[in-house]
Image: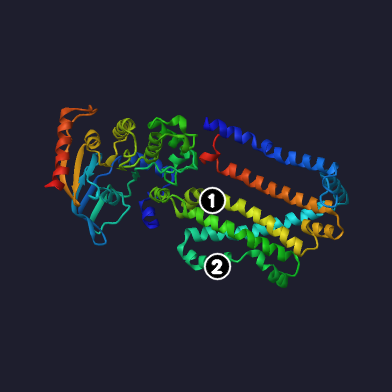
Amino acid sequence: MFAQALRAQPLRRTDAALARETRARPVAAAITVRGLSKAFGEKTVLSGLDLHVPAGQFVAIVGKSGCGKSTLLRLLVGLDRPSAGEVRVGEGAPVTRLMFQEPRLLPWARVGANVEVGLDPATPAAARTGLALEALREVGLADRAGEWPAVLSGGQKQRVALARALVSRPQLLALDEPLGALDALTRIEMQALVERVWQAQAFTGLLVTHDVAEAVALADRILVLEQGRVALDLMVDVPRPRRRGDPTLAALEGRILDSLLGGGGA
Amino acid sequence: MAAATTRARRALPDATGWIVPVVLVLAWEAASRLGAIPETVLPAPSGVAAAAIRLARSGELARNIGVSTLRALSGFVVGGGIGLALGLANGVSSLSERLTDTTLQMIRNVPHLAMIPLVILWFGIDEEAKLFLVALGVFFPIYINTLHGIRGVDPQLVEMGRIYGMSPARLFRRVILPGALPSIFVGLRYALGIMWLTLIVAETISASSGIGYMAMQAREFLLVDVVVLSIVIYALLGKLADTTARLLERLTLQWHPSFQGR
């Protein structure tokens, strides 16, 4: 577990090299998956999955509980090792970040320090506070940097978690049902925020969700996962900003729901 | 509103906490003056204060308090230090835990004061004996609560730290240790109580200096005021230790919702 975590960590760089690299490095990472399988003991969760995600695409992965969507996400960000097959993300050692369903902020660190957790440990101390503040500004919480996480609301905590994920300018941002625990209105606000930062930073986005409406509202492309395979791969060709209740989106949503429910019922 | 009550509770405890003791002392003084309590059973507070002044003038009081405090603190540092180190080690490493925890749990079930006869045989009535007993008594609450604290650290936070590329050392410093701190403080305060208790017993049974010794000497000469004075000093020292621990707690646990409001 430690070894994996350390592998996921970007290579240490010097200050000057960091500056040079940030300019040179691509803002998004493409993902190529070939013949990916994952089994936990007897149980096969993913079997022979092929997938290509171009750099900068926002992909939503939907499916019933236990369809392997979270497992796929963990494999893509390098938290687990595949049983068979190959996962390639970007070139060299791209920065990938994962956002969880819970904010997972350190309660003993102020909001600003929590965001700094997302920075590469090699980032010079003098730059850390500024970068953290900038990330907080992006999620609209710059004025809360000095507060303890305990005083924030659930939605604000999740925004701090988003800032923590964004502060290192990831080339791949994976979101594992990050809005599942929020109330309906906060959810819609957060969706708009995620869409805005994605448009601004242009990283590759992977969103695991069980909310089909959310997937349709946010994603360029939707993958429906069923029994460890891609059952449906749909492009969402609706211009942004998308209006809630748009008939094209509603039709798409209906089609995905049919596929999800039909697959189990038939 | 909750914040207001917390703030009120924060500002007031020092004053409110002393109302009851002050009233009790005044009642005691009055009862003594009226002859309700005979001098040979319990001298008046003013008598105890006079004894304190007498002993302070002769330098005996300061010397004995100094000796006792030094014993308490050195035993606390040794026992608490070992307890903290083992608690941290066993919390982080399962190998270390499998190796030592069973043994420690067995020893824990022996009341450490039951060791007094053995300790006297080993160390006589020298400083080592007191240091050993205090260290032994302080060790377990710190060990158990440190271990328990580390076990209780939210595994989701640990996973987050790993995913965000924290090295093991950083993970320990930023996530595991702060997460275990509230529990470590519980152990610390409990250990401070045991520290004074152990020292009182040890000094009463076998010592040639210290507050316990002062009390036992006074008993031989029927100086009830000095005996009472010794008890009062123990109470004050215990209170002082607890207040210090609370202060440290408040400084280091500012993030904790129950310490917020500054």
Task: Using the image, name the chain to which the residue with label 1 belongs.
Answer: B
Task: Using the image, name the chain to which the residue with label 2 belongs.
Answer: B
Q: Residue at x 39, y 41 (%)?
A: A103
Element type at mark 1:
helix
The reply to whether label 2 and label 1 mark residues of one chain is yes
Q: Kindly tell me whether residue A184 is visible in this rendering.
A: yes
Q: Amino acid at mark 2?
A: Met
Q: Identify whether A103 is placed above or below B3.
A: below
The numbered mark, 2 or 1, whose residue comes first in the sequence reads 2
Residue B5 appears at what percent x and percent y?
56, 32
B196, A142: nearer the viewer: B196
- The answer to whether residue A209 is left or right of residue A232 is right
- The answer to whether residue A73 is left or right of residue B249 is left
Screen quadrant of the C terminus of chain B: top right
Q: Which mark is residue B106?
A: 2
Residue A37 appears at what percent x and percent y?
22, 56
Element type at mark 2:
helix
Q: Which residue is mark 1?
A: B183
Colour scheme of this structure image? rainbow
**Dot 2: within a 10 Å radius of its alpha carbon, few (fewer than 14), some, or many (20 or more) residues?**
few
Q: CA distance from mark 2 to mark 1?
A: 22 Å
- Residue at the front extreme, as displayed: B36
A35, B76: nearer the viewer: B76
Residue A35 appears at what percent x and percent y?
19, 55
Q: Kindly tell me whether residue A174 is visible in this rendering.
A: no
- The answer to whether residue B256 is left or right of residue A206 is right
Q: Which mark is residue A193?
A: none
**Dot 1: within a 10 Å radius of its alpha carbon, few (fewer than 14), some, or many (20 or more) residues?**
some
